[in-house]
Image (cartoon, grey):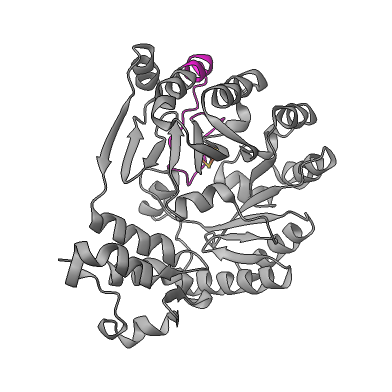
């Protein structure tokens, strides 16, 4: 079982907070798609016999690709790789691209899951984020998709915005509740370097939300999600029964994945590789039949630490028995999965059951801090 990620590195405009790899210059769209098809051809040999259960178009903004280019990519994956007939095929879509024409085209291609970048239902917030859509489009696009037969839809929301209040967040969630979607992701606004947001914060033009505000909004999110029948299965992800994201689940569960496109990462049996984050150089390299990628073999310590970090982000937590069996012989004493080694503060954040350590939902925001305390050190 494996997953495929296709990175489409184009956007209409740069969102204030975004540090993903994308370009607003879309002149090379056709060449880039050709290069991605070539990359699939080259890499397919190394994935012989693997059954792919998820295909995920992410970005950037995959929904700005023409239907014919999306079709080229999907048919290359279907011809060159073994894709399960029941595969989850997700497209990240922005509301401004979700016209009836596109939705019908995506459905015909076999896209059976949409991940919609709504972010907010308020015009002034969307403008501040420099999103390409407005509140009206945010409200209409999901309904349109549902009307055309999409029955597996996820929406993205951002909270803890500067100067935001709990009431504002409550209103956003009340609107989201009416959309009747199967899944949603809620992200805290983070200030990433080299973004317009970072520049504004550095210049003192605005201040990120204070920790108390973030916590208050997070607490409301958790109780609202429970009331609405969503399972909080990962720190930022919530699903109705049977609608967890299979593709993202692969990342968190160490399932192999193949990444295609500029800046895409792949992971296969302890080897991680990543493509160059530069559209033109990516195209040039593949025109010469060369993979524009570098790779590394993860050490046992890297694997152990990542297992902790990813495990604590999940509802299921980490299986300490399995980790001890797998890494104990390699890492020995440096493994700190012993409750006695933790401070009482750390222990309070965890729910400890038979061979399993989980973060308490109320403490999930401190996940990185707790993970770091458990990391391997020699
Ligand atoms: S549309 Fe998505 S990828 Fe593109 S700039 Fe905005 S947040 Fe980033």
**Residue drawn 42% across the image and 80% down it:** 349
Which image quadrant is residue 54 in? top right
Q: Which corner quadrant holds the C terminus?
A: bottom left
Label tally: 0
Instruction: Decide which of 321, 176 is in the foreground and name it.
Output: 321
Q: Is residue 156 magenta?
A: no
Instruction: Decide which of 281, 378 is in the foreground and name it.
Output: 378
**Residue drawn 23% across the image and 51% down it:** 299
Q: Is residue 28 magenta?
A: yes
Which image quadrant is residue 187 in? bottom right
**Residue drawn 77% across the image and 54% down it:** 179
Instruction: Decide which of 99, 329 is in the foreground and name it.
Output: 329
Instruction: Kindly give the residue lying farthest to the front in the view shown.
Output: 49
Q: Is residue 104 left or right of residue 363?
A: right
Instruction: Kindly give the residue lying farthest to the right in the view shown.
Output: 147
The answer to whether residue 209 is above or below residue 48 is below
Q: Residue 209 location in percent, x, y?
A: 48, 65
Q: Is residue 338 left or right of residue 286?
A: left
Instruction: Decide which of 220, 206 is in the foreground and name it.
Output: 220
Magenta range is: 9-34
The answer to whether residue 184 is above or below residue 230 is above
Q: Residue 361 location in percent, x, y?
A: 53, 74
Q: Is the magenta region chiefly helix, strand or loop?
A: loop
The answer to whether residue 181 is above or below residue 210 is above
Instruction: Kindly give the residue lying farthest to the top in the view shown.
Output: 288
Q: Residue 87 location in percent, x, y?
A: 63, 40
**Residue drawn 64% across the image and 66% down it:** 231
The answer to whether residue 325 is above or below residue 201 is below
Instruction: Kindly give the residue lying farthest to the left in the view shown.
Output: 378
Which image quadrant is residue 35 in? top left
Q: Residue 79 location in percent, x, y?
A: 57, 22
């Amino acid at each position: 079982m494996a997953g495929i990620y296709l990175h489409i590195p184009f956007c209409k405009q740069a969102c204030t907070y975004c540090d993903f790899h994308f370009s607003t210059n879309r002149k090379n769209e056709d060449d880039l798609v050709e290069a991605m098809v070539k990359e699939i051809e080259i890499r397919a040999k190394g994935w012989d016999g693997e059954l792919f259960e998820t295909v995920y178009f992410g970005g950037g903004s995959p929904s700005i690709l023409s239907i014919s280019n999306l079709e080229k990519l999907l048919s290359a994956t279907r011809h060159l790789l073994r894709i399960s007939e029941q595969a989850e095929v997700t497209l990240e879509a922005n509301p401004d691209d979700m016209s009836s024409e596109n939705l019908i085209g995506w459905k015909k291609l076999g896209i059976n899951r949409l991940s919609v970048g709504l972010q907010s239902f308020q015009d002034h917030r969307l403008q501040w984020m420099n999103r390409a859509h407005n509140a009206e489009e945010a409200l209409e696009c999901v309904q349109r998709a549902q009307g055309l037969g999409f029955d597996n839809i996820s929406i993205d929301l951002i909270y803890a915005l500067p100067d935001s209040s709990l009431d504002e967040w409550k209103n956003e969630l009340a609107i989201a509740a009416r959309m009747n979607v199967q899944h949603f992701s809620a992200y805290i606004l983070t200030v990433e370097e080299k973004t317009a947001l970072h520049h504004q914060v550095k210049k003192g033009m605005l201040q990120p939300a204070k920790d108390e505000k973030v916590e208050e909004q997070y607490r409301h999110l958790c109780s609202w999600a429970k009331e609405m029948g969503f399972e909080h299965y990962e720190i930022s992800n919530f699903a109705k029964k049977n609608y967890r994201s299979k593709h993202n689940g692969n990342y968190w569960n160490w399932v192999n994945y193949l990444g295609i496109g500029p800046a895409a990462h792949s992971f296969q049996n302890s080897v991680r590789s990543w493509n160059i984050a530069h559209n033109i150089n990516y195209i040039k390299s593949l025109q010469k039949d060369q993979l524009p990628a570098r790779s590394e073999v993860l050490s046992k310590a890297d694997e152990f630490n990542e297992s902790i970090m990813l495990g604590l982000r999940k509802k299921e937590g980490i299986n300490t028995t399995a980790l001890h069996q797998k890494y104990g012989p390699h890492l020995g004493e440096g493994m700190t999965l012993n409750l006695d080694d933790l401070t009482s503060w750390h222990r309070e954040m965890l729910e400890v059951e038979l061979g399993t350590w989980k973060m308490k939902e109320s403490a999930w925001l401190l996940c990185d801090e707790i993970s770091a305390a458990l990391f391997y050190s020699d």
